[in-house]
């Protein structure tokens, strides 16, 4: 199973300004300290080996969209955030090389940042494409049609040429989708959200759990999430806020923290955690600091096997 | 995890050691509720939690502190965190709980 991140930002797409790029270049030049590089390869080695990711790269700014390469050759995509546009274009490149045109979507919920990419999803105009949209919400079709109404978008949903189906999923039931067993869990979020557990024939398991709040006055309910995350190879988890923010000014905003994610994964004996749904006001330095601190917290509270804490960014690929 | 509650002249002190995590958070929460009740009955305004002997506190324990803070606010009892050791100082900083609670490095002065 391969997990590929096309959009990792929470709530709102963001892009670096000219000033931010200028600051990265300035930091890189200072770090180079007058060195000369004889080739692009040599310069890239310097970027990869000696610059922080926040200086030499970026976590990106597209909203939630995560692809899983698994099963019998069709596509598996979690959420339709703004990262979906780039996935759609890339999948058309793959389709031209013979890839199946069946797209299996799994929607965490129907808020804008998780569906805004669909009107720009080019394969939806391909009459040979098959699009199955799985959701826990019975009103998923209504949400997707509504965002393409004339007041919001010039192309109505009915103009899409692909064969589009909606499949409602139910917590507690396992759905077999093109060689992958998929389960769902109800999560605490405005208008509800759903997490997904994907298990392939090779025994690899990935969890997608975003926009899920774990509140202080309902911690007993976390046992269900520990069971859902149990022994997963990768848990992609909403880590938008600090724990303090999630229980104070941002309580009831529907999101979780890096510390809760680590604790759930520790208890579930998951192998790796991907920090996800990054706060849109965070600069790359802020996200990197959060990643470093989360690694440290995992070390401080570890009581068994080590949990590999990775930080999702647009373009990251994780092989399970 | 073990805790001991002591009613002093100026505050109620609760000392906690071991780990506050998924297996002990409920017991720790019950202890904090008891300490708040004792502070209210003794007409004391402060509950001091001595963190010097704590091995670590996971998010469960930290969120129990939040629940206790709300309970304390209703009872007119302020919760202070005292003498966090190195591990607890790091956890309070990483969680940003150092912005939610007053931290004193001299638990004795509050006793």
Image: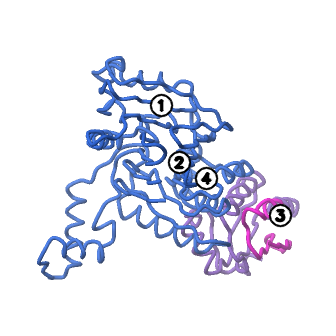
- Foreground mark, 3 or 1, reads 1
Residue A169, placed above or below residue A232: above
Which residue was labeled with disc 3?
A: B31
Residue depicted at x 76% and y 76%: B18
Image quadrant in which you'd find residue B33: bottom right
Marked residue chain, label 4: A
Q: Colour of chain B?
A: purple
- Foreground mark, 1 or 2, reads 1
Label whose residue precedes the other's in the sequence (4 or 1): 1
- Foreground mark, 4 or 2, reads 2
Looking at the image, residue B109 sits to the left or right of residue A150; the answer is right
Same subunit under labels 4 and 1?
A: yes
Which residue was labeled with disc 1?
A: A133
Chain that appears blue? A
Image quadrant in which you'd find residue A173: top right
Same subunit under labels 3 and 2?
A: no
Image quadrant in which you'd find residue A36: bottom left
Q: Position of residue A219 (x, y in %)?
A: 71, 52
Residue B14 located within the stretch drawn in magenta: yes
Label whose residue precedes the other's in the sequence (1 or 2): 1
Marked residue chain, label 2: A
- Foreground mark, 3 or 2, reads 2
Q: Position of residue A297 (x, y in %)?
A: 57, 70
- Checking the image for residue A208, the label placed there is 2
Same subunit under labels 4 and 2?
A: yes
Q: Which residues are magenta?
A: B1-30
Report helix, strand or loop for mark 4: loop
Looking at the image, residue A47 sits to the left or right of residue B6; the answer is left
Report helix, strand or loop for mark 1: strand
- In the image, A272 versus B69, the foreground residue is A272
């Amino acid at each position: 199973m391969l997990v590929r991140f096309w959009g990792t930002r929470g709530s709102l797409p963001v892009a670096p300004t000219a000033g931010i790029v200028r600051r990265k270049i300035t930091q890189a030049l200072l770090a180079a300290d007058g060195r000369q590089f004889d080739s692009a390869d040599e310069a890239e080695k310097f970027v990869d080996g000696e610059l922080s990711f926040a200086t030499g790269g970026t976590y990106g700014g597209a909203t939630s969209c995560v692809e899983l390469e698994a099963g019998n050759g069709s596509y598996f995509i979690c959420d339709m955030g703004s990262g979906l546009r780039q996935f759609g274009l890339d999948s058309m490149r793959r389709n031209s090389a013979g890839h199946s045109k069946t797209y299996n979507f799994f929607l965490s919920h129907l808020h804008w940042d998780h569906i805004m990419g669909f009107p720009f999803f080019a394969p939806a105009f391909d009459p040979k494409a098959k699009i199955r949209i799985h959701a826990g919400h019975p009103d998923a079709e209504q949400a997707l049609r509504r965002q393409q109404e004339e007041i919001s978008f010039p192309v109505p949903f009915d103009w899409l040429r692909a064969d589009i189906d909606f499949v409602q999923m139910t917590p507690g039931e396992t759905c077999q989708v093109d060689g992958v067993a998929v389960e769902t869990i109800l999560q605490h979020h405005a208008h509800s959200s759903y997490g997904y557990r994907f298990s392939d024939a090779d025994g690899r398991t990935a969890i997608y759990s975003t926009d899920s709040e774990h509140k202080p006055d309902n911690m007993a309910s976390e046992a269900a999430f520990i069971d859902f995350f149990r022994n997963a190879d990768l848990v992609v988890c909403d880590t938008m806020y600090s724990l303090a923010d999630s229980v104070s000014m941002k309580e009831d905003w529907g999101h979780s923290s890096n510390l809760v994610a680590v604790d759930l994964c520790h208890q579930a004996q998951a192998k790796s955690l991907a920090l996800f749904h990054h706060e849109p006001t965070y600069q790359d330095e802020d996200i990197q600091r959060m990643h470093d601190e989360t690694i440290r917290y995992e070390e401080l509270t570890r009581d068994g096997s080590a949990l590999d804490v990775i930080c999702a960014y647009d373009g990251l690929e994780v092989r399970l | 995890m073990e805790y001991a509650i002591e009613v002093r002249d100026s505050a109620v002190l609760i000392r906690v050691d071991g780990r506050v995590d998924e297996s002990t958070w409920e017991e720790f929460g019950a202890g904090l509720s008891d300490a708040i009740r004792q502070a209210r009955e003794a007409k004391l305004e402060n509950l001091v939690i001595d963190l010097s002997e704590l091995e670590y506190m996971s998010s469960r324990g930290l969120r129990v502190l939040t629940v206790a803070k709300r309970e304390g606010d209703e009872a007119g009892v302020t919760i202070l965190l005292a003498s966090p050791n190195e591990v607890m100082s790091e956890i309070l900083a990483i969680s940003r709980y150092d912005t939610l609670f007053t931290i004193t490095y001299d638990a004795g002065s509050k006793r």
